[in-house]
Image (cartoon, helix red, strand yellow):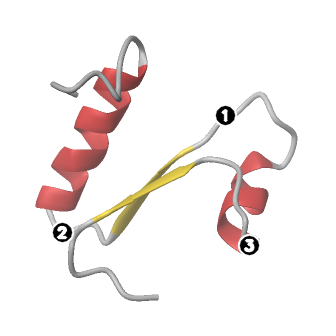
Amino acid sequence: IDSGVVSGGMIPKVNCCVRSLAQGVRAAHIIDGRIPHALLLEILTDEGIGSMIVGSAFTN
C-alpha cells in the first residue's frame, strides 16, 4: 500500500484480507462480483480471475 501498488478502492479490501490472515484465515480472495460465476472461476480453476492473498506459510 505504501509503495502505491494498491490504491483507491482496493486499499480497504486488502486491509480486510490482511486482518483476516492475522486472525488465522489461510487465504483471502478479492474477486469482481459483476462477472458471472466469478467465485467458481476463482476457486475451481488454476488460472482464477481475481487476487488471492495468502500468509507466508500457505501450501496448496
State the residue position of label 1: 32
Residue type at the position of mark 3: Leu
* Residue type indicated by callout 1: Asp
Q: Residue at x 69, y 33 (%)?
A: 33
Q: Residue at x 76, y 47 (%)?
A: 38
Horizontal side of 46 relative to 27 (left or right) equals: right
Residue 7 vertical position relative to residue 5 in the rendered view, above or below: above
Between 5 and 42, the one nearer to me in the picture = 5
- Give the Cα distance between marks 2 and 3: 22 Å
- Label 3: which residue? 44
Quarter holding the N terminus is: top left
User: Residue 28 occupies which quadrant of the picture?
Assistant: bottom left
Q: Earlier in the sequence, mark 2 or mark 3?
A: 2
Three-letter code for the amino acid on which mark 2 is drawn: Gly
Dot placed on the residue nearer the N-terminal end, 1 or 2 = 2
- For disc 2, the marked residue is 24
In this view, the residue farthest toward the top is 8
Q: Looking at the picture, how far across and down is residue 20, in whole percent? A: 23, 53
Say whether residue 43 is left or right of residue 4: right
User: In this rendering, is residue 20 above or below 11?
Assistant: below
Between tags 1 and 2, which lies in front?
Answer: 1
Q: Residue at x 13, y 60 (%)?
A: 23
Q: Residue reaching furthest bottom?
A: 60
- Label 1 vs 3, first from the N-terminus: 1
Q: Secondary structure at mark 3?
A: helix
**Residue contact at pointers 1 and 3, CB within 8 angstroms:** no
Foreground residue, 32 or 7? 7
Q: How many marks?
A: 3
